[in-house]
């Protein structure tokens, strides 16, 4: 998955990075890696902070540019470019011109059943915690309170706790 993302970034950044006189040729690969790394880090940040809604919104598509994922990825990418000695205004311009488009293409490929270059389960397993495991059932369990191997625990999930507030 990471190789596919790097290739997607490389294909999408020819003008903004490779053909940009503000980025020295010897830093092109590092800038491309910084873009893909920033996207992965932004996805991880959304998952680890519990912003499942942000991830779901991002993968549903829509306004990618204003999404938390795009904003986090852009900020990280700007920091990495600035750390490479790229002028801050140039870094901001590059991030604004490439990150939303790359994320949009990434999401479209992930959602396209005809495109196997990105699989949603693979993406989630790569951005999940240190154990590298993420099951869609983890989200279901959050709401139902079920533990692994149980059919469904009564009264342990968020939905049941919320019901108690309104009874």
Image (spheres, helix red, strand yellow):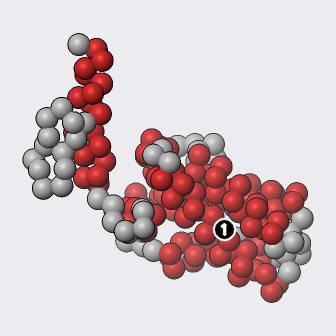
Tell me which residue sits at (45%, 46%) in the image: 50
Q: Name the residue under label 1.
A: 35
Q: Is residue 161 left or right of residue 107?
A: left
User: In percent of the image, x 48 and y 53: which residue is there?
Assistant: 48
Confirm whether residue 28 shows in the render.
yes
Quadrant the N terminus occupies: bottom left
Measured as percent of width and height from the top left, residue 116 is found at 37, 71
129 over 85 or under it: above or below: above
The C terminus is located in which quarter? top left
Q: Kindly identify the residue that appears in the image at 27 percent across and 27 percent down.
A: 161
Q: Is 127 on the left-hand or right-hand side of 144?
A: right
Whole-percent x and y of residue 38?
63, 64
Q: Position of residue 104 (x, y in %)?
A: 56, 56
Coordinates of residue 60 in the picture (x, y in percent): 44, 46
Which one is nearer the viewer's eye here, 15 or 50?
50
**Residue 115 falls left or right of residue 100:** left
Q: Nearer the viewer, residue 127 or 13?
A: 127
Residue neighbourhood size for the residue with mark 1, other residues' Cα within 10 Å, grouped as few (<14), some (14–19), many (≥20)? many
Count of labels in the image? 1
Determine which quarter of the picture holds residue 35.
Answer: bottom right
* 106 up-or-down from 11: above or below: above
Q: Which residue extends farthest top? A: 167
């Amino acid at each position: 998955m990471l190789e596919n993302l790097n290739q997607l970034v490389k294909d999408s950044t020819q003008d903004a990075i490779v053909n940009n006189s503000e980025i020295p040729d010897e830093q092109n690969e590092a800038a491309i890696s910084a873009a893909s790394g920033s996207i992965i880090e932004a996805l991880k940040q959304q998952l680890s902070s519990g912003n499942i809604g942000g991830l779901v919104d991002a993968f549903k598509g829509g306004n990618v540019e204003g999404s938390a994922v795009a904003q986090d990825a852009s900020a990280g990418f700007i920091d990495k470019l600035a750390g490479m000695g790229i002028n801050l205004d140039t870094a901001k311009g590059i991030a604004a011109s490439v990150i939303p488009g790359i994320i949009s293409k990434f999401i479209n490929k992930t959602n396209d059943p005809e495109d196997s270059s990105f699989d949603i389960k693979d993406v989630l397993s790569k951005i999940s915690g240190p154990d590298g495991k993420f099951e869609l059932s983890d989200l279901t369990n959050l709401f139902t309170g079920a533990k692994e191997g149980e059919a469904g625990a009564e009264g342990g999930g968020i939905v049941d706790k919320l019901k108690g507030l309104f009874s």
